[in-house]
Amino acid sequence: MQLGVLNLGNNQLEDTFPHWLQTLPYLKVLVLRDNKLHGSISLFKTKHGFPSLNIFDISSNNFSGPIPENYIQSFESMKNVVQDEVVGNPQPYMQWEYSIGIIYSPTTVTTKGTSVSFKKVPTNFVNIDLSGNKFEGEIPKAIGELQALTGLNLSHNRLSGHIPQSMGNLTVLESLDLSSNMLTGSIPTEFLNLKFLEVLNLSYNHLVGEIPIGKQFGSFSNDSYKGNLGLCGDPLSIKCSRNHDQHSPPSQSLWRKEKFGFGWKAVAIGYGCGTVFGVGIGSFVFLIGKPKLLVRMFVIIC
């Protein structure tokens, strides 16, 4: 079957992921967004699934479990950067019709935070959108192999762990949205390699440390980082110190100091005074020879 485009978005489909679609070797565009699809996307017994896929949009469903790394590794077409080239043809009016990499089908995708409708989708537009689901676990390192990606949206899921350094290999990436997850750690300095990145959204995670300095990072606003209380540096008003202590969660000892209002110095002074007082009372008891009377007085006071 030579099906190249399958767009079933914005319907009321209720089912699990249609694994059989992997058997379509020429499928370039798969859009299943805004349905009621659910469940995990488990391994399917196909050696080379989705080898021609350029657009994979399953956003706004109820998919759960980890992002299927075996699928990511099978997206062979997304691993090779395609240049804008046109087949030589003596008839200029035929160039659009026979130009390399034109998919003839109206398709709507979300890129750079905006819904865009294409009548003809060029093959150098490579996009993955898994947003608005319940995916959990870490972002697969294999995503860094998809070097033809121009758009990646993993926002509004339950992803955790660090952002893979391998994503710095996505050198033609123009839009990256990892917002509203539970990602930890720092922003990889490898992101400085993403020289075409125009839109970055890392908001509402648990990221810490200094925001990378230089290149395209000078063009991103506070909105790219809001909701990450541990981040510091431009464009945020929180400046970084050498050890970033003021941006790290307070330690247990500091928490105790703040809660009870005293630190180790007060404890040391109290311990010393208590020792002197105890020795003095003990000596006094034995000097007067009436320990029972003192004990009764202590019990009455307490």
Image (cartoon, helix red, strand yellow):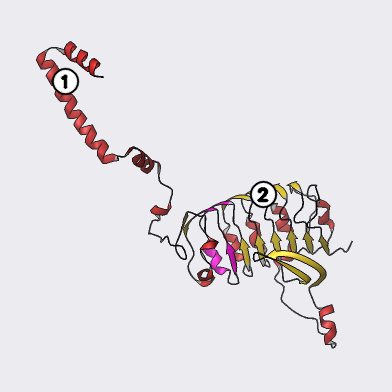
Relative to 174, 96 lies left or right: right
Residue found at the far bottom of this picture: 90
Judge whether residue 201 is colored magenta: yes
Q: Which residue is mark 2?
A: 135
Write the residue at 50% across / 55% down: 228
Q: Look at the image and tell me in which quarter the N terminus lies.
A: bottom right
Residue found at the far right of this picture: 1
Q: Which mark is residue 241?
A: none
The residue under label 1 is which amino acid type? Gly
Q: Kindly tell me whether residue 26 is visible in this rendering.
A: no
Write the residue at 38% across / 42% down: 255
Relative to 27, 180 lies left or right: left
Q: Which residue is mark 1?
A: 282
* Quadrant housing residue 59: bottom right
Question: Percent from the top left, x then y, of residue 180?
Answer: 59, 53
Q: Kindly tell me whether residue 218 is visible in this rendering.
A: yes
Relative to 198, 245 lies left or right: left
Write the residue at 52% across / 58% down: 226
Question: Which residues lie in the magenta part?
Answer: 182-207
Q: Are marks 2 and 1 in contact (CB under 8 Å)?
A: no
Residue 280, compared with residue 36, is above or below; it is above
Give the alpha-carbon distance from disc 2 to disc 1, as whole Å.
Answer: 67 Å
Write the residue at 21% across / 13% down: 296
Residue found at the far left of this picture: 287
Q: Residues within 10 Å of mark 1 (few under 14, many from 20)?
A: few
Which type of secondary structure does the marked residue at label 1 adopt?
helix
Which type of secondary structure does the marked residue at label 2 adopt?
strand
